[in-house]
Image (cartoon, rainbow, N blue to C red):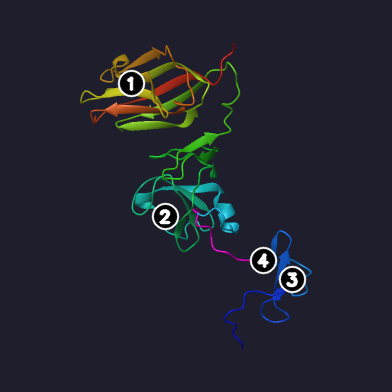
């Protein structure tokens, strides 16, 4: 066998690999083709998964599948299912624990739970509702708005772009957690009309409850002085300036301060995605 140290190419349009019956690298006007020995059909080429940081990297079938997945199981990282329990399917880690990160998608290949590469725009579709640090609605289509965990998964296709003049609601159950956020976002151009905080179990430790739209610039829609979480009751705030812009569009977040040990209720936010003139 001859080895050519300084071979830099061939003047021919075809280059056989593995002898006359081997596959062919063929010159093409817009690149190169991988062909069979007779040059009558295309052949497959295998490449590693793209790194996710080099634009020019080729992608393979696994990259394509990972970019648009159906979530078929979910788990708390502290009690993750063993590899092989859900072979061939994708899962969603809703709460960090062990070596698993909330918001991350994992593929069960039968031997391990492999973390997928997630870029801005990666899409996932849920079957069942997912509840945890990151919660997702059942039968929802979500897009990643960040390439960093937990990826800011944002619900899409729920009709919020339409329905001019129709009031929509977002409801968030609250407990003693310091922060609770909705899975749905209030979009640019919407108008927040009313916030209702219902305390069913009074809070202790002088807890306070604040409700805001969690955008680049937060918009407080029920400040702490408009409710009393120490008493079971319904507290309703009519929002005087609830206009949502590109700087404050986002999910609804409820902040509960002073680390209470008891307390529960819910927050309902009413808004119109667009208003009639």
- Residue 86 versus residue 152 in the image, above or below: below
Q: Position of residue 74 (x, y in %)?
A: 45, 47
CA gap, disc 1 and disc 2: 36 Å
- Residue assigned mark 3: 13
- The location of residue 210, given as percent across then percent down, is 33, 23
Instruction: Kindly indicate the quadrant of the structure image that contains residue 14.
Output: bottom right
- Earlier residue among tags 1 and 3: 3
Q: Which residues are magenta?
A: 44-53
Q: List the residue tagged with mark 4.
A: 44
Which residue is tagged 2? Answer: 81
The main secondary structure of the magenta stretch is: loop
Element at label 1: strand
253 vs 45, left or right, is: left
Q: Residue at x 56, y 15 (%)?
A: 275
**Residue 112: quadrant of the picture:** bottom left
Label drawn at residue 199: 1
Sequence-wise, the earlier of marks 1 and 2 is 2
Question: Helix, strand or loop at disc 2?
Answer: loop
Q: Residues within 10 Å of mark 2 (few under 14, many from 20)?
A: some
Seen at 55% across and 34% down, the residue is: 156
Q: Tag 3's secondary structure?
A: loop
Q: Quadrant of residue 103?
A: top left
Name the one closer to the observer, 108 or 161: 161
């Amino acid at each position: 066998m001859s080895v050519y140290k300084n071979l830099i190419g061939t003047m021919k349009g075809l280059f056989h690999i593995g002898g006359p019956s081997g596959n062919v690298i063929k010159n093409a006007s817009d690149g190169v083709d991988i062909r069979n020995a007779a040059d009558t059909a295309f052949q497959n080429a295998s490449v590693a998964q793209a790194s996710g940081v080099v634009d020019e990297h080729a992608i393979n079938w696994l990259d394509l599948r990972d970019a648009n997945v159906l979530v078929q199981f979910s788990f708390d990282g502290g009690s993750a299912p063993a590899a092989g329990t859900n072979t061939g399917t994708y899962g969603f880690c809703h709460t960090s624990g062990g070596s698993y990160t909330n918001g991350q998608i994992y593929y069960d290949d039968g031997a391990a739970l492999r973390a997928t590469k997630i870029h801005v725009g990666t899409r996932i579709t849920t079957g069942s509702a997912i509840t945890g640090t990151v919660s997702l609605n059942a039968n929802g289509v979500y897009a990643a708005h960040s390439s960093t965990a937990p990826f800011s998964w944002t619900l899409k296709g729920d009709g919020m772009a339409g329905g001019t003049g129709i009031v929509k609601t977002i409801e968030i159950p609250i407990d003693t957690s310091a922060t609770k956020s909705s899975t749905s976002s209030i979009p640019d151009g919407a108008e927040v009309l009313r916030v209702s905080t219902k305390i069913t179990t009074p809070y202790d430790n002088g807890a306070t409850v604040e409700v805001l739209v969690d955008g680049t610039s937060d918009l407080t829609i029920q400040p702490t002085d408009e409710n009393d979480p120490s008493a079971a009751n319904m507290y309703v705030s009519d929002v005087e300036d609830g206009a949502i812009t590109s700087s404050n569009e986002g999910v609804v977040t409820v902040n509960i301060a002073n680390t209470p040990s008891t307390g529960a209720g819910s927050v309902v936010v009413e808004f119109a995605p667009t208003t009639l003139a």
